[in-house]
Image (cartoon, helix red, strand yellow):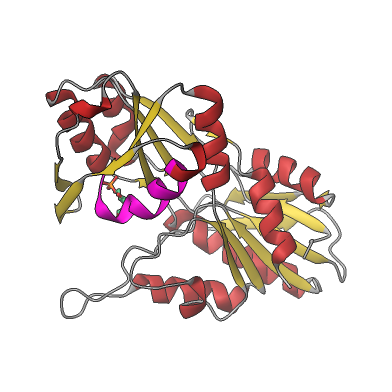
Amino acid sequence: MTPELLFAMPGNEALAKTLAGALGCGIGTLVMRKFPDGETYLRFKSAIGRKHIALISTLADPDPKIIPLLFAADAARTMGAAQVGLVVPYLAYLRQDHSFEPGEAVTSRAMAALLSQHFDWLVTADPHLHRYKSLAELYTIPATAVHAAPAVSAWIAAHVENPFLIGPDEESAQWVSETARDINAPYVTLKKTRRGDRSVTVSAPDLTTIDDRTPILLDDIISSGRTMLEAVKLLRAQGVAHPICLAIHGLFADHSDQALIELGARLVTTNSVPNPYAQIDLTGILADGLHTLA
Ligand code: R5P
């Protein structure tokens, strides 16, 4: 499914350009600014007519982005768009997938309901699915998840000699094992206990078997950074070399990128969220995902 026009929400212009190139579709112009009172002004400056359009918006730090995104989708529909799709390289609000305490909102469901109401389809990269098996359990629109693993493997193969992959928790085993198989590298996963948003402990087996290989801590998301920080400290305490911290989605809340760099880690992420460490381009993988949509 190829949209005829792709519109970048603010901050998504670089990926919009490469993705439009890969898809062979046009790039439209969408102007957005804030009124003095903080409300959002939006204007599509490209004619939409009966076109099939898509918006691209990553959703790191999602709350300020969601209202403008929904307004843009509604405006496009009002202008006559035949279909309005969403390319969302990082899809937020997947981690609260259960009401752990009475009264807690299951925001993964609420978010899915909102996006399903406003869009005809979506494509995202490596959504954090834990209790849900697939996006289809949440989204009522066609929702495709593409996987960054081939791009991650290619980056490691091209840039790191003798890698040793380390998953910082049991959940990471799914992508760490796949990547290790792709590049024929050994791997191990650590054990993590989360006590709060910013409180995790990580334990590890004997890691001295890494020898002179380059340790790569591989995870789907660096959010508060606490998982990676604790894992890096553990590696260093065992005398393992400074690792590469590689994540698909680099959110780096609380300036955790700086804290990781201060511990001697090198940071690498995909460009699902624009950041200075985004060395792995997801353009081709996202374009393939759009092609698979019926
Ligand atoms: C958890 O299951 C995920 O795979 C990541 O390990 C987690 O989201 C990282 O979060 P933080 O950076 O806040 O420790």
Relative to 55, 143 lies left or right? left
Expressed as whole percent of the image width and height from the top left, the position of residue 149 reads 52, 47
> Residue at horizontal 21%, vertical 36%?
231
Q: In this rendering, is residue 126 above or below 186?
A: below
> What residue is shown at x 14% (from left), y 34% (from top)?
206
Left or right, 46 with respect to 249, comes to right
Pick the quarter of the image with the N terminus: bottom right
Predominant SS along the magenta part: helix
Residue nearest the viewer, comparing 107 with 89: 89
Q: Where residue 201 appears, x then y in whole percent?
A: 12, 45
Q: Does 207 sit above or below residue 138? A: above
Whether residue 232 is situated above or below residue 52 in the rendered picture? above
Instruction: Name the residue: 31% across, 67% down.
Output: 96
Q: Is residue 54 left or right of residue 182?
A: right
When asked about the image quadrant of residue 174, the answer is bottom left
Left/right placement of residue 113 relative to residue 213 reads right
The region drawn magenta spans: 168-180
Quadrant location of the C terminus in the rendered image: bottom right
Percent x, y for residue 73? 66, 67
Membership of 175 in magenta stretch: yes
State yes or no: residue 85 in magenta.
Answer: no
Q: Residue 8: tell me if it is visible.
A: no
* Rendered location of residue 183, percent (x, y): 49, 37
Q: Nearer the viewer, residue 77 or 279?
A: 279
Q: How many marks?
A: 0
Q: Nearer the viewer, residue 155 or 56?
A: 155
Instruction: Please indicate, yes or no, whether residue 121 appears anywhere in the rendered image.
Output: yes
